[in-house]
Image (cartoon, rainbow, N blue to C red):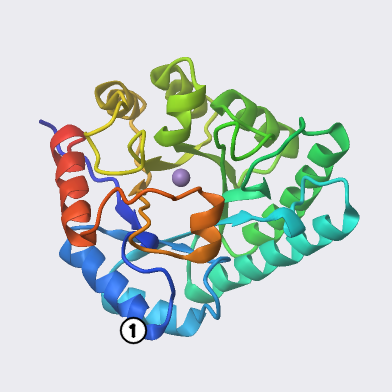
Amino acid sequence: MTTYHNPIGIHAQVWVGDWSPASARKACASSVEAGYDLIELPVSSIEEFDPVMTAAIVAEYGLKMGASLGLQEHSDISSEDDAAVQAGRAVLREALSLVRDCGGTYLGGVIYGKLGRYTAKATPRGRANSMAVIAELADEAAASGITLGLEFCNRYETNLMNTTAETLAYIDEVGRDNVVAHLDCYHMNIEENSFRDAVLAASAAGKLGYVHVGESHRGYLGTGSIPWAEFFGALHEVNYQGPITFESFSSEVVQPVLSRNLCIWRNLWTDSMDLARSAREFIRENYGA
Ligand code: MN
C-alpha cells in the first residue's frame, strides 16, 4: 500500500473533559503515545483555556494543533435575535484570539450556528446573520493566517447545512478564500447520497479543508456501518493532503456542555488508550497514513 502523509489527529475529549495544565499534558502525552500527529482542542467548551500553557505543552510534545467549537442557543449567530448573534460573534472572536495566541492555524466546527436540535427550518434572515459574522471572522482570521472550517452536521444538530453541497453553497456566498468545508463521515453517513461524490465535490470547489473520521455510533472505528473503503478511496482519488482527525465520544469522558450537545448518553468505550491505538491502527491499515 502507498504511504500517505496526512497529519493524523485526535480529539482531546478522547482523553480529558477539561483543560487544566495536568489534563493538557495527559492529553498531549497520550496522543503522542498512541501515534497521533495532531490534537484537536474544543476551544469554546473548555473553561479557562490558557493559550500560553497550551502552546507550550503542544510544542513540547511536537504536536500540530486544530481547534473546534460548537455555538450554543444563547450564542447562535444564525438566530434572528440580535442579542444571540452578537453573543455568538463575541464567542467566535474570543476563540479566534485563543487559536492565534496558541499559534494555531485552524478554527473549525459548528461555528456558523448552534450545535443542537432545531424545531424549524433556518430562515433567510438567520442565514444572512450567520454569513455576515462568518465573513467578518474570516477577514480577521486571514490577517493571522488562520483558516475557518465549516463542519456541516446531520439534521438533528443543525438546520443550516446538512450536506457537502449545502456547505459549499454557503461558502460560495460568503466568498472568502480562507473558509473551507470540514467533512465528518459520521454526519455524511446520515445525510449524503454518496461519500465519494461529496468528497469529489468539495475537492473540485477547492474547499476540502479538514476531515473528521468517526464511526456511525462514534465508537471504535471499523465496528459500525461507515463505508470506509469508499470514503478513504475518495480522499486518495482527490489527493487530499489535509488533516484526518479521529473523533469518538463516550460517557466515560465527560465535558458537560459538549457531551450534552452531542447527546453522548451511551458508554461506547472505557479505555481511551485502547480506543485511540485501535483507531490509529485502523487508519494506518485502511487509509495508509
Ligand atoms: Mn466532527
Q: Quadrant of residue 127?
A: top right
Residue at image coords 14%, 45%: 281
Residue toward you, 86 or 155: 155
Residue at image coords 62%, 48%: 115
Q: Quadrant of residue 55?
A: bottom left
Residue toward you, 167 or 156: 156
Rendered position, 40 above or below 222? below
Q: Does the rendering let one see residue 155?
A: yes
Q: Does the rendering let one see residue 289?
A: no
Residue toward you, 272 or 31: 272
Residue 273 image position (x, y, % from top left): 19, 61
Rendered position, 28 above or below 149? below
Picture quarter with the N terminus: top left
Rendered position, 197 above or below 108? above
Label 1 Cα crowd, 10 Å radius (few <14 / some 14-19 / many 20+): few
Q: Secondary structure at mark 1?
A: helix
Q: Is residue 129 left or right of residue 229?
A: right
Residue 72 image position (x, y, % from top left): 67, 56
The residue under label 1 is which amino acid type? Ala
Q: Quadrant of residue 274?
A: bottom left
Residue 35 image position (x, y, % from top left): 18, 58
Residue at image coords 35%, 78%: 23
Q: Which residue is mark 1?
A: 22
Picture quarter with the C terminus: top left
Q: Is residue 105 left or right of residue 224?
A: right
Residue 48 image position (x, y, % from top left): 55, 81
Residue at image coords 77%, 33%: 122
